[in-house]
Image (spheres, rainbow, N blue to C red):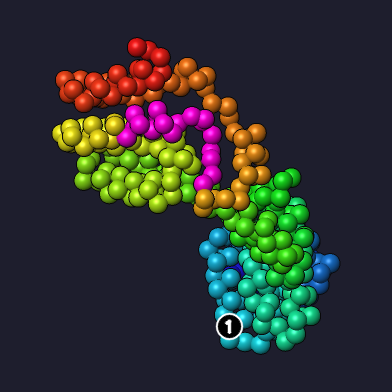
Amino acid sequence: MKEINIAEVIIKKRREKGVTQEELATYVGVSKASVSKWENGNSYPDITLLPVIASYFNITLDDLMQYSPMLSDEEVNELYVKLADLFANGPFEYAVAECEGFSKKYYHCLPLVMQIALLYINHAAMADSEERSVEVLQEAIRLCTHVQKESRDVKLIRQVMHYRGLCYVQANEPQKAIDLLSDEHGFPAQEGDGYLMSQAYQLLGNIDKANEVEQSEMLKGLFSLFESLISYLRLNVGDFETALPVFERAEQLITQYNMKQLNANSTGNFYVLAAMMYNLAGKHKEALGMLTKFTELCIHDFWPVRVQTDDFFNRLDDWLKIYARTSPLPRNEVLVNKSMLYEGLLNPAFENLHNFSEFNKLVTQLKKFIGED
């Protein structure tokens, strides 16, 4: 962290310019002794002289004072650690005063301001009274609001909104947290705010809505994990040693979370990829087993194409109605059925299986289902 050191700058710039202390003193209109005191650090120039000195050396006032409103990421992290240590080992009010000083000094260094807000959030409970704790949280809210208004960094804005919501919950103002973090339907507007929203609804005594939010967040997280496993399996489908553990974990999700009912489309894609994995490894029996599961899914579990609930996810009727309105419409049913056949069973990746009677039975079953006898 750079400290203001006018003496160092004056000495450096005077020597670069090749002038004496007396020449500088004459230009500024002070005695040589005054310049000497500045350079020795015994005194500072009068504030009215700073623009004159900066102009003489052709530098800005910030350069003269070695001041920058911005700190590097490394400096922000170093300062955060230093201030956190003050909270851990020093008097609470002294740590708060230090934070206030740095937040004023670097008010436009938004990453630092956000980190100071986080320090307040993490340590407000250490205050000597509940009233003082709320005051510290309110200051954190003020700093977060400043960052939100001034920043153009979407990631920073999202993060600081989350911190504001956390402040409201800790300060027992749950409705403000909900108003800030929710969409028009009362669900989290951005990823990662679900648990805060749930806490806020619990504080309001709305346990049903808290459960609804928790279930919607779990379901979205489950779908995200499942899609990531499918993507990873696709990436490594030709490397059996890598792909097999991915397949096994995804298959466990299908069983444990009833994915055939919750998300039949993704489950079907998984079975096709799993069949490719086994087929490329020369394990034809296992490949045919996966294609059998795919065919049974297409015939018995695929339609209607929509996210559904089960006995575990049993509080999501309202959320699913919203989800259905905002989700892209599925392709035409005829086209979807054809894709089951031609992108699934009759995929060129399974051409070597055409000589197996079991494979041909599956093709016949699926053709009958989609009306291509």
* Residue 97 higher or lower than 51, as above or below: below
At 65% from the left and 51% from the top, the residue drawn is 188
Residue toward you, 312 or 108: 312
Secondary structure under badge 1?
Answer: helix
Number of numbered markers? 1
- Magenta region: which residues? 293-310
Q: From the top left corner, tell me how far across and down residue 262 is, in percent.
A: 48, 42
Position of 352 relative to 113 (above/below): above
Measured as percent of width and height from the top left, residue 242 is found at 25, 46
Q: Is residue 26 visible?
A: no
> Closer to the camera, 289 or 248?
289
| Left-right relation of 250 to 76 | left
**Side of 157 relative to 373 (left or right):** right
Of residues 93 and 122, the one drawn nearer to the viewer in this rendering: 122
* Residue occupying image coordinates x 38% and y 33%: 297
Q: Amino acid at mark 1?
A: Ala
Q: For residue 298, what is the image quadrant? A: top left
Rate crowding at label 1 as few (under 14), some (14 to 19) or many (20 or more) other CA atoms within 10 Å. Answer: few
**Where does the N terminus fall, quadrant-wise?**
bottom right
Magenta-span inclusion, residue 303: yes
What is the quadrant of residue 86 in the picture? Answer: bottom right
State the residue position of label 1. Answer: 88
In the displayed structure image, the side of residue 50 where residue 158 appears, left or right: left
- Residue drawn 41% across and 31% down? 300
The quadrant of the image that shows the C terminus is top left
